[in-house]
Amino acid sequence: MDKNLLIEEAKKAREKSYSPYSKFKVGAAVLMRDGRIFHGTNIENSSYPLCMCAERNAIYNAMNNGYKKEDFLALALIADTEGPVTPCGACRQVISELMPKGTPILMASLRGDLQETTPEELLPFAFDEKALKNL
Ligand code: THU
């Protein structure tokens, strides 16, 4: 996997951001096993809770195109931050459920920072479907 290429794709996704309220543009890109790449960017709304993060949009974009959990190879995200941008808690929950354990998550910044992690490192003790079986 070419990490720099996926980060460049996340940067392209960021250019599509609709973030007139926060003015904080985020871009994400997911790489699939067959080589396809899907973009996601943050899309805000004047009704603030309706804002959607870049990472979730990228994952949902791939799934809306018929891809499944086992098809994800990597996710990259980028913003104009001091240090690598990290996913919010809601995105960590979604990443944890929809991407395989061990999937490289590349957290980058426009300034060239890069830190790599995994879904389980981002969200230890994740709530998952096992809990629902105890009802
Ligand atoms: N945002 C993301 O897109 N991803 C994150 O993980 C953190 C936050 C977006 C949501 C909102 O549009 C803006 O950044 C400011 O919170």
Image (spheres, rainbow, N blue to C red):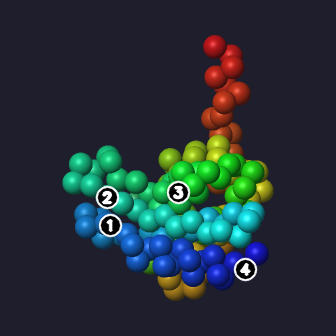
Whether the residue under disc 2 has CB within 8 Å of ligand 1 = yes
Q: Which mark is residue 18?
A: 1
Give the residue at mark 2: 44
Q: Which residue is mark 4?
A: 2
Is 10 rendered above or below residue 128?
Answer: below
Tags 1 and 4 touching, CB below 8 Å: no
Which mark is first along the chain, 3 or 1? 1
In three-dimensional space, the C-alpha distance between marks 4 and 3, rounded to whole angstroms, equals 21 Å
Q: Do the numbered discs 1 and 2 sit on residues whose CB atoms are within 8 Å?
A: yes
Mark 1 and mark 4: Cα distance apart in space: 27 Å
Instruction: Name the element at disc 4.
Output: loop
Earlier sequence position, callout 3 versus callout 2: 2
Q: Secondary structure at mark 1?
A: loop
Residue type indicated by callout 1 = Tyr
Distance of label 4 from label 2 (alpha carbons): 30 Å
Marks 3 and 2 in Cβ contact (< 8 Å) = no
What's the CA distance linking mark 1 and mark 2?
A: 6 Å
Q: Is 72 placed above or below 81 here?
A: above
Which residue does the numbered mark 3 point to in the structure image? Answer: 61
| Badge 3: residue crowd in 10 Å (few <14, some 14–19, many ≥20) | some
Determine the residue positioned at 27% across, 50% down: 48
Up the image or down, 57 lies above or below 36; here it is above
In front of the other: label 3 or label 2? 3
Please tell me how crowded label 1 is: few (under 14), some (14-19), or many (20+) other residues with Cα within 10 Å: some
Q: What is the x, y in percent for residue 84?
A: 56, 73
Mark 2 or mark 1, which is nearer the start of the sequence? 1
User: Would residue 6 appear left or right of 39 to someone viewing this image?
Assistant: right
> What amino acid is at disc 3?
Asn
Q: Hey, what amino acid is under mark 4?
A: Asp
Ligand 1 quadrant in view = bottom left
| Screen quadrant of the N terminus | bottom right
Residue 17 spot, x, y in % from top left: 37, 69
